[in-house]
Image (cartoon, helix red, strand yellow):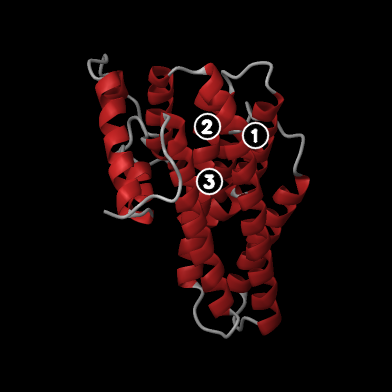
Protein backbone atom coordinates (compact mmCIF):
# COMPACT_ATOMS: atom_id res chain seq x y z
CA UNK A 1 0.00 0.00 0.00
CA UNK A 2 1.24 3.51 -0.79
CA UNK A 3 2.55 5.52 2.14
CA UNK A 4 1.12 8.88 3.11
CA UNK A 5 3.60 11.73 3.25
CA UNK A 6 1.63 13.45 6.04
CA UNK A 7 0.56 11.85 9.30
CA UNK A 8 -3.23 11.92 9.61
CA UNK A 9 -4.67 11.44 13.08
CA UNK A 10 -7.40 13.82 14.27
CA UNK A 11 -10.57 14.26 12.17
CA UNK A 12 -9.59 17.87 11.38
CA UNK A 13 -6.50 16.51 9.60
CA UNK A 14 -8.82 15.86 6.67
CA UNK A 15 -8.24 19.55 5.89
CA UNK A 16 -4.78 18.59 4.60
CA UNK A 17 -6.41 16.29 2.05
CA UNK A 18 -9.05 18.84 1.09
CA UNK A 19 -6.35 21.43 0.50
CA UNK A 20 -4.46 18.88 -1.59
CA UNK A 21 -7.55 18.51 -3.79
CA UNK A 22 -7.82 22.29 -4.12
CA UNK A 23 -4.16 22.50 -5.12
CA UNK A 24 -4.69 19.87 -7.82
CA UNK A 25 -7.67 21.79 -9.21
CA UNK A 26 -5.77 25.08 -9.05
CA UNK A 27 -2.76 23.65 -10.85
CA UNK A 28 -4.94 22.14 -13.60
CA UNK A 29 -6.62 25.48 -14.11
CA UNK A 30 -3.28 27.26 -14.25
CA UNK A 31 -1.98 24.69 -16.77
CA UNK A 32 -5.02 25.28 -18.99
CA UNK A 33 -4.42 29.03 -18.77
CA UNK A 34 -0.80 28.46 -19.79
CA UNK A 35 -1.91 26.40 -22.79
CA UNK A 36 -4.48 29.03 -23.72
CA UNK A 37 -1.70 31.54 -24.31
CA UNK A 38 -1.02 29.70 -27.57
CA UNK A 39 -4.60 30.08 -28.81
CA UNK A 40 -7.59 27.80 -29.04
CA UNK A 41 -10.95 27.54 -27.32
CA UNK A 42 -11.31 28.73 -23.72
CA UNK A 43 -14.10 26.31 -22.85
CA UNK A 44 -11.99 23.90 -20.79
CA UNK A 45 -10.39 26.76 -18.88
CA UNK A 46 -13.77 28.32 -18.17
CA UNK A 47 -15.13 25.02 -16.86
CA UNK A 48 -12.08 24.34 -14.67
CA UNK A 49 -12.05 27.81 -13.17
CA UNK A 50 -15.79 27.70 -12.57
CA UNK A 51 -15.51 24.42 -10.65
CA UNK A 52 -12.61 25.82 -8.63
CA UNK A 53 -14.69 28.85 -7.63
CA UNK A 54 -17.74 26.70 -6.85
CA UNK A 55 -15.71 24.59 -4.44
CA UNK A 56 -14.13 27.65 -2.82
CA UNK A 57 -17.51 29.32 -2.32
CA UNK A 58 -19.00 26.35 -0.52
CA UNK A 59 -15.76 25.68 1.37
CA UNK A 60 -15.62 29.24 2.70
CA UNK A 61 -19.28 29.39 3.66
CA UNK A 62 -19.49 26.11 5.56
CA UNK A 63 -16.07 26.39 7.23
CA UNK A 64 -16.84 29.81 8.64
CA UNK A 65 -20.13 28.49 9.98
CA UNK A 66 -19.06 25.22 11.59
CA UNK A 67 -15.29 25.52 12.15
CA UNK A 68 -14.22 29.08 12.93
CA UNK A 69 -17.44 30.62 14.30
CA UNK A 70 -17.34 28.40 17.42
CA UNK A 71 -13.71 29.44 18.04
CA UNK A 72 -14.38 32.55 20.11
CA UNK A 73 -11.54 34.76 21.34
CA UNK A 74 -9.33 33.40 18.56
CA UNK A 75 -7.67 35.87 16.20
CA UNK A 76 -6.44 33.18 13.75
CA UNK A 77 -10.08 32.11 13.31
CA UNK A 78 -11.14 35.70 12.57
CA UNK A 79 -8.29 36.09 10.08
CA UNK A 80 -9.31 32.83 8.43
CA UNK A 81 -12.88 34.07 8.03
CA UNK A 82 -11.59 37.25 6.42
CA UNK A 83 -9.52 35.26 3.92
CA UNK A 84 -12.56 33.11 3.13
CA UNK A 85 -14.71 36.19 2.61
CA UNK A 86 -12.24 37.60 0.12
CA UNK A 87 -11.98 34.33 -1.81
CA UNK A 88 -15.71 33.69 -1.89
CA UNK A 89 -17.05 37.17 -2.54
CA UNK A 90 -14.70 37.94 -5.40
CA UNK A 91 -15.50 34.70 -7.20
CA UNK A 92 -19.26 35.27 -7.42
CA UNK A 93 -19.23 37.10 -10.73
CA UNK A 94 -17.44 34.24 -12.46
CA UNK A 95 -19.73 31.67 -10.85
CA UNK A 96 -22.67 33.58 -12.33
CA UNK A 97 -21.06 33.54 -15.77
CA UNK A 98 -20.21 29.82 -15.64
CA UNK A 99 -23.71 28.87 -14.55
CA UNK A 100 -25.22 31.02 -17.35
CA UNK A 101 -28.06 32.06 -15.12
CA UNK A 102 -29.48 35.39 -14.01
CA UNK A 103 -26.23 37.06 -12.98
CA UNK A 104 -27.86 39.81 -10.97
CA UNK A 105 -30.09 37.41 -9.05
CA UNK A 106 -27.24 35.00 -8.39
CA UNK A 107 -24.90 37.69 -7.15
CA UNK A 108 -27.58 38.96 -4.77
CA UNK A 109 -28.06 35.42 -3.40
CA UNK A 110 -24.34 35.01 -2.89
CA UNK A 111 -24.03 38.39 -1.22
CA UNK A 112 -26.77 37.38 1.21
CA UNK A 113 -24.89 34.18 2.00
CA UNK A 114 -21.74 36.21 2.63
CA UNK A 115 -23.29 38.72 5.06
CA UNK A 116 -22.04 36.90 8.13
CA UNK A 117 -18.46 36.85 6.89
CA UNK A 118 -15.95 39.45 7.99
CA UNK A 119 -14.21 41.51 5.33
CA UNK A 120 -11.15 43.24 6.74
CA UNK A 121 -7.87 41.75 5.51
CA UNK A 122 -6.14 40.20 2.50
CA UNK A 123 -7.39 42.75 -0.05
CA UNK A 124 -4.69 41.58 -2.43
CA UNK A 125 -6.36 38.18 -2.72
CA UNK A 126 -9.69 39.79 -3.57
CA UNK A 127 -8.08 42.04 -6.16
CA UNK A 128 -6.38 39.10 -7.87
CA UNK A 129 -9.61 37.08 -8.04
CA UNK A 130 -11.42 40.07 -9.54
CA UNK A 131 -8.68 40.50 -12.13
CA UNK A 132 -9.01 36.86 -13.19
CA UNK A 133 -12.77 37.18 -13.52
CA UNK A 134 -12.52 40.37 -15.57
CA UNK A 135 -9.82 38.97 -17.84
CA UNK A 136 -11.76 35.78 -18.53
CA UNK A 137 -14.96 37.67 -19.30
CA UNK A 138 -13.02 39.96 -21.61
CA UNK A 139 -11.42 37.04 -23.42
CA UNK A 140 -14.69 35.19 -23.88
CA UNK A 141 -16.35 38.34 -25.20
CA UNK A 142 -13.81 38.93 -27.93
CA UNK A 143 -14.33 37.61 -31.44
CA UNK A 144 -10.57 37.20 -31.71
CA UNK A 145 -8.87 36.72 -28.38
CA UNK A 146 -5.57 38.54 -28.37
CA UNK A 147 -2.33 37.00 -27.18
CA UNK A 148 -1.98 39.83 -24.69
CA UNK A 149 -5.34 39.07 -23.10
CA UNK A 150 -4.40 35.40 -22.75
CA UNK A 151 -1.09 36.28 -21.13
CA UNK A 152 -2.81 38.55 -18.63
CA UNK A 153 -5.34 35.83 -17.83
CA UNK A 154 -2.57 33.30 -17.17
CA UNK A 155 -0.63 35.64 -14.90
CA UNK A 156 -3.72 36.48 -12.87
CA UNK A 157 -4.73 32.86 -12.39
CA UNK A 158 -1.18 32.06 -11.30
CA UNK A 159 -1.25 34.92 -8.78
CA UNK A 160 -4.60 33.76 -7.39
CA UNK A 161 -3.30 30.21 -7.03
CA UNK A 162 -0.26 31.41 -5.06
CA UNK A 163 -2.42 33.48 -2.72
CA UNK A 164 -4.77 30.54 -2.22
CA UNK A 165 -1.78 28.41 -1.22
CA UNK A 166 -0.78 31.01 1.37
CA UNK A 167 -4.28 30.85 2.83
CA UNK A 168 -4.16 27.06 3.11
CA UNK A 169 -0.79 27.20 4.84
CA UNK A 170 -2.13 29.70 7.38
CA UNK A 171 -5.23 27.61 8.02
CA UNK A 172 -3.28 24.41 8.58
CA UNK A 173 -0.68 26.08 10.78
CA UNK A 174 -2.91 28.24 12.96
CA UNK A 175 -6.60 27.29 12.78
CA UNK A 176 -6.42 23.50 12.64
CA UNK A 177 -4.14 23.42 15.67
CA UNK A 178 -6.67 25.45 17.67
CA UNK A 179 -9.45 23.08 16.58
CA UNK A 180 -7.45 20.15 17.95
CA UNK A 181 -6.96 21.95 21.26
CA UNK A 182 -10.57 23.07 21.75
CA UNK A 183 -12.70 20.35 20.14
CA UNK A 184 -13.03 16.68 21.07
CA UNK A 185 -12.74 14.03 18.36
CA UNK A 186 -16.53 13.60 18.39
CA UNK A 187 -17.09 17.34 17.94
CA UNK A 188 -14.59 17.31 15.09
CA UNK A 189 -16.41 14.39 13.44
CA UNK A 190 -19.68 16.31 13.47
CA UNK A 191 -17.89 19.34 12.04
CA UNK A 192 -15.98 17.58 9.25
CA UNK A 193 -19.13 15.80 8.08
CA UNK A 194 -20.66 19.22 7.45
CA UNK A 195 -17.56 20.36 5.58
CA UNK A 196 -17.23 17.24 3.43
CA UNK A 197 -20.91 16.58 2.67
CA UNK A 198 -23.75 18.91 1.73
CA UNK A 199 -26.94 18.33 3.66
CA UNK A 200 -30.00 18.24 1.41
CA UNK A 201 -28.13 18.24 -1.91
CA UNK A 202 -29.06 15.88 -4.75
CA UNK A 203 -25.68 14.22 -4.15
CA UNK A 204 -24.64 15.01 -0.56
CA UNK A 205 -21.22 13.39 -1.20
CA UNK A 206 -20.20 15.63 -4.12
CA UNK A 207 -17.49 17.33 -2.05
CA UNK A 208 -15.91 14.30 -0.38
CA UNK A 209 -16.03 12.36 -3.65
CA UNK A 210 -14.09 15.14 -5.36
CA UNK A 211 -11.45 15.01 -2.60
CA UNK A 212 -11.26 11.21 -2.82
CA UNK A 213 -10.67 11.46 -6.57
CA UNK A 214 -7.71 13.81 -6.07
CA UNK A 215 -5.72 12.01 -3.35
CA UNK A 216 -3.43 8.98 -3.12
CA UNK A 217 -4.68 5.44 -2.31
CA UNK A 218 -3.45 5.46 1.31
CA UNK A 219 -5.00 8.88 1.88
CA UNK A 220 -8.21 7.68 0.24
CA UNK A 221 -8.33 4.74 2.63
CA UNK A 222 -7.95 7.05 5.63
CA UNK A 223 -10.63 9.46 4.40
CA UNK A 224 -13.04 6.61 3.64
CA UNK A 225 -12.59 5.34 7.19
CA UNK A 226 -13.19 8.87 8.49
CA UNK A 227 -16.43 9.03 6.50
CA UNK A 228 -17.59 5.82 8.17
CA UNK A 229 -16.73 7.29 11.57
CA UNK A 230 -18.63 10.54 11.13
CA UNK A 231 -21.62 8.73 9.62
CA UNK A 232 -21.70 6.49 12.69
CA UNK A 233 -21.64 9.50 15.00
CA UNK A 234 -24.45 11.23 13.11
CA UNK A 235 -26.55 8.06 12.67
CA UNK A 236 -29.98 8.20 14.27
CA UNK A 237 -30.67 11.85 13.47
CA UNK A 238 -34.12 13.32 12.92
CA UNK A 239 -33.98 13.14 9.11
CA UNK A 240 -34.51 16.88 8.91
CA UNK A 241 -31.81 17.10 6.23
CA UNK A 242 -34.12 15.45 3.71
CA UNK A 243 -36.46 18.43 3.96
CA UNK A 244 -33.74 20.99 3.25
CA UNK A 245 -32.54 22.03 -0.16
CA UNK A 246 -28.81 21.92 -0.71
CA UNK A 247 -26.60 25.02 -0.65
CA UNK A 248 -26.18 25.24 -4.42
CA UNK A 249 -29.79 24.22 -5.08
CA UNK A 250 -30.85 27.23 -3.01
CA UNK A 251 -28.19 29.42 -4.59
CA UNK A 252 -28.84 28.56 -8.24
CA UNK A 253 -32.55 27.76 -7.98
CA UNK A 254 -32.27 24.09 -9.00
CA UNK A 255 -35.55 22.17 -8.75
CA UNK A 256 -33.92 18.76 -8.93
Q: Nearer the viewer, residue 221 or 252?
A: 221
Q: How many numbered badges does the structure rendering display?
A: 3
The local crowd at label 3, few if under 14, some if 14 to 19, many if 20 or more residues have their Cα within 10 Å, is some
Residue at the image point whose x is 62% and y is 26% from the top: 116
Single out the residue that lies furthest toward the left.
236
The local crowd at label 2, few if under 14, some if 14 to 19, many if 20 or more residues have their Cα within 10 Å, is some
Q: Which of the two marks, 3 or 1, is nearer to us in this view?
A: 1
The local crowd at label 1, few if under 14, some if 14 to 19, many if 20 or more residues have their Cα within 10 Å, is many
Classify mark 2: helix, strand or loop: helix
Between the residue at mark 2 and the residue at mark 1, the CA separation in whole angstroms equals 9 Å
Which labelled disc corresponds to residue 25? none
Residue at the image point whose x is 43% and y is 33% from the top: 195
Which labelled disc corresponds to residue 63? 2
Q: Which residue is mark 3?
A: 56
Q: Which residue is mark 1?
A: 80
Q: Are marks 2 and 1 in contact (CB under 8 Å)?
A: yes
Q: Earlier in the sequence, mark 2 or mark 1?
A: 2
Q: Is residue 2 left or right of residue 30?
A: left
On the image, the x and y values in percent for residue 218 come to: 31, 49
Between the residue at mark 2 and the residue at mark 3, the CA separation in whole angstroms equals 10 Å
Classify mark 1: helix, strand or loop: helix
Q: Nearer the viewer, residue 37 or 2?
A: 2
Residue at the image point whose x is 47% and y is 51% from the top: 20
Q: Earlier in the sequence, mark 2 or mark 3?
A: 3
On the image, the x and y values in percent for residue 4 come to: 39, 50
On the image, the x and y values in percent for residue 43 come to: 47, 71
Q: Is residue 140 left or right of residue 216?
A: right
Classify mark 3: helix, strand or loop: helix
On the image, the x and y values in percent for residue 183 come to: 49, 18
Between the residue at mark 3 and the residue at mark 1, the CA separation in whole angstroms equals 13 Å
Amino acid sequence: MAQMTTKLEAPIDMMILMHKAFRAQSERTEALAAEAQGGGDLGALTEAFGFWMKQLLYHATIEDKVMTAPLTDCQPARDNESEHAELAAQGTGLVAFIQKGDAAGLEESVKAAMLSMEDEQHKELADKATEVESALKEALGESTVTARTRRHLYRRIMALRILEYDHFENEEAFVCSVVKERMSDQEQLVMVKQILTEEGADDPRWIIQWVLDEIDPAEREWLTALESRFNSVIAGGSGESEKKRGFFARLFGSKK
